[in-house]
Image (cartoon, grey):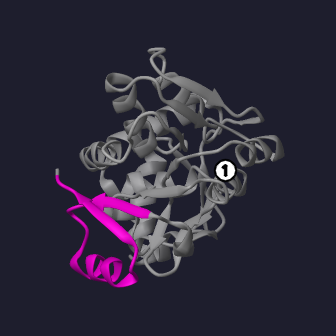
Amino acid sequence: MGKRSALILDLIDGQGAISYKDLAKSLDVSTMTVRRECEELFQTGKIIRTTGGIRLANEELGFYESTTDERIYANSSEKRAIAKLALELIKEPVTIFIDGSTTGLALAKLIDAGRKGMTVVTHSTIICLALRSGLNRVICAGGDFDSRSLCLVGPEVEQFVKSVFIDIAFVSATGFIPKIGTFESDPATFRVKQAVASQASELVLLVDHTKFGRRALSKVLDQSQISHVITDVQLAKEHVTALLDSGVKASLASL
């Protein structure tokens, strides 16, 4: 599966359905290109055509696990590199938050393999499973289970994260535009990130180069809420310039 197909699945897994027009806008390609990519996904049974767009072929947990594997595979080198750089920001002992992103999962695996005595707050079941060595304290905020994101969501989660002190929050996003902020499509999960942003002393955005310049259904975080952006060295020159001009602290991870 190509990178563009993986990005299409990434865009729809948060909302279940999307139009060809919105896909073309998010990926900065023609609708003809999007339709061609979607046809390949349709042939493999991953999506179903709708009027003017596509939706997930199956929203059952088993299908989402397959999609998650594909998202982990997409840009996996970049995500590992970003996670390694993010790990360097963590000075023990601290309390951190990790969202349910695949880059966050890469960070959780590094923490589980080489750190101990930390407190990790999350609303993601896959992050909890990644931190199963028992060397760190893991607190999972309880709420309604969202089978698409494998996260726990809802008012209870939002209220809980607002009640705990978080030194550093590590979050990702569907899209990021320097000077503007982050974009996502699933209100249930992005409201948790908004709650975390209001509570954390620092918020670190983990986004690989493919996320830059992309919009989604809703704006989630203002750039002013972001303490540090970590991306990878494959970031296009124009986005590097925009990132540096935006004034936010930024790091580019080497592959």
| Residue 20 visible in rendering | no
Q: Is residue 87 above or below residue 240?
A: above
Within 10 Å of disc 1 (Cα), the crowding (few <14, some 14-19, many 20+) is many
- Residue 198: x, y in percent? 67, 60
| Residue 238 visible in rendering | yes
Q: Which of 105 and 229 lies nearest the eye of the viewer?
A: 229
- Residue 244: x, y in percent? 31, 79
Q: Which of 232 and 223 lies nearest the eye of the viewer?
A: 223
Q: Is residue 253 left or right of residue 149?
A: left
Residue that mark 1 sits on: 189
Q: Residue 219 occupies which quadrant of the picture? A: bottom right
Magenta segment: does it hold 62? Answer: no
Q: Residue 57 occupies which quadrant of the picture? A: top right
Q: Which of 48 and 176 lies nearest the eye of the viewer?
A: 176
| Number of numbered discs on residues | 1
- Residue 193: x, y in percent? 63, 54
Q: Residue at x 62, y 39 (%)?
A: 58
Which amino acid, mark 1?
A: Thr
User: Start and end of the magenta stretch?
Assistant: 228-254
- Residue 116: x, y in percent? 41, 23
Disc 1 is placed on an element classified as: helix
Q: Which of 143 and 140 lies nearest the eye of the viewer?
A: 140
From this viewpoint, which residue is outermost toward the right?
Answer: 155
Magenta segment: does it hold 248? Answer: yes
Q: Is residue 149 above or below residue 19?
A: above
Q: Is residue 189 left or right of residue 213?
A: right
